[in-house]
Image: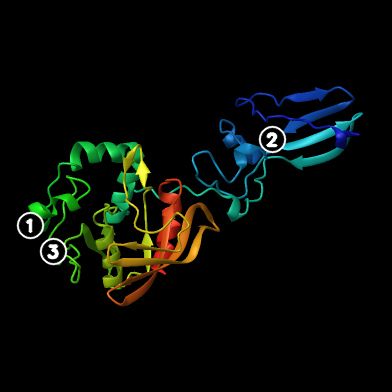
Amino acid sequence: YYRRVIIIYRIVYPARGGALPSVRVEGGISIVLTMPAATKKLAKRRVHTRGRADCSVAIDGGRRTVGRRVGAHVKVAVGGRIVNMQKVAEPRAPIATKFTRKLPEDKSLPSHKASVSELWMDEVAALGIRGIRKEFVNDLKSYVPSGPQSAWECEKNYDKNRFEDIRLLDCTRVILRNTPDNEDYIHASYVKVDEDFMFICAQGPLKNTAQHFLIMIVQEGSKVVLQLCQAVEDGREQCAEYIPLDGTECKDYGAVRVRVLEKPKHVVSLKKVVRTKLQITYAGVSHEVRFDFPQIYQLFTDYNYMREYVHK
């Protein structure tokens, strides 16, 4: 019968010289507490039972010592006859490592030396999207990079820039070499990541620069074009049409012909991203390229995957 009775208790040691308590439960079951001599020194210290307090995962993340601990003996008596005697203050077996919560490394310790990239990522994460936008408007929008910007400042290139506050450095800009109007300007820059990986960052083409944008793709031999914006956002045009999206198989943009090789379709793992394959022909040279662009603008989730695809 006693095995079907669940008793929730807490062992409380008496003050020095005091008597041990005896707890009686209805049904003829009583619990008598005795204390070994070795434990009298610990009378004022709390000894944990097999409950939550002895779990290997503490609230503060520290792992408890699992060494042997001397505890109280419990005698369970039924009808005056002792039927069981056991220690209840023995430590429980440690929980497996995979269940142990590991706190993140304390970066404030002298032993941890954060890299520049870690510091930058921490700062960006702390700002959040709203903070980044606010920082750009308040602090960075008026920033003028050092270095010559003669091509961007040239009056004849004024109508080829979508934004007045996004400048273009001469040292990193893409220079067009063979255009119908002999103009070499396009608002696009080389961005070098490492020795074997470089990409071009360009503004959304304008109606009068769509031809130049396509010529740049053929000239640079680009394999993938990744569009990070929609054509229209918040009622403002962000990108003019430069590839046929109305079901037309072939379309001309000035002296450049674009042919659809694969109809636009959703990426399997990214339902809001559309991918298509095109053939761009200019000056007798044909070049195949893949285009990825969003139907609904999202932030980092989709584009992290797409960046990995581009890097491959």
Q: Which type of secondary structure does the marked residue at label 1 adopt?
A: helix
Left or right of 69 in this view: 141: left
At 40% across and 65% down in the image, what residue appears?
A: 310
Badge 1 amino acid: Ser
Q: How far from the left and from the top, in percent, is residue 164? A: 17, 45
Q: How far from the left and from the top, in percent, is residue 255? A: 27, 66
What mark, if any, has residue 235 been given in the picture? none
What residue is pinned by disc 2?
35
**Quarter of the image where one finds residue 205:** bottom left
Q: Which type of secondary structure does the marked residue at label 3 adopt?
A: loop
Which one is nearer the viewer's eye here, 41 or 135? 135
Decide if residue 115 is in sight here. no
Distance from disc 2 to disc 3, alpha carbons, whole Å, reads: 83 Å
User: What crowding class fits label 1: few (fewer than 14 Cα within 10 Å), some (14-19), or many (20 or more)?
Assistant: few
Distance from disc 2 to disc 1, alpha carbons, whole Å, reads: 90 Å
**Quarter of the image where one finds residue 252:** bottom left
Which one is nearer the viewer's eye here, 120 or 299? 299
Whichever of labels 2 and 1 marks the residue nearer the N terminus, that label is: 2
User: What crowding class fits label 2: few (fewer than 14 Cα within 10 Å), some (14-19), or many (20 or more)?
Assistant: some
Badge 3 amino acid: Cys
Q: Are the two marked residues, 2 and 3, in contact with CB atoms closer than 8 angstroms?
A: no
Whether 249 is drawn above or below 297: the answer is below
What residue is pinned by disc 3?
171
Location of the C terminus (image quadrant): bottom left
Q: How far from the left and from the top, in percent, is residue 209? A: 24, 57
The mark lying in front, picked from 2 and 1, is: 1
Q: Are the two marked residues, 2 and 1, in contact with CB atoms closer than 8 angstroms?
A: no
Badge 2 amino acid: Met
Which one is nearer the viewer's eye here, 78 or 129? 129
Whichever of labels 2 and 3 marks the residue nearer the N terminus, that label is: 2
Location of the N terminus (image quadrant): top right
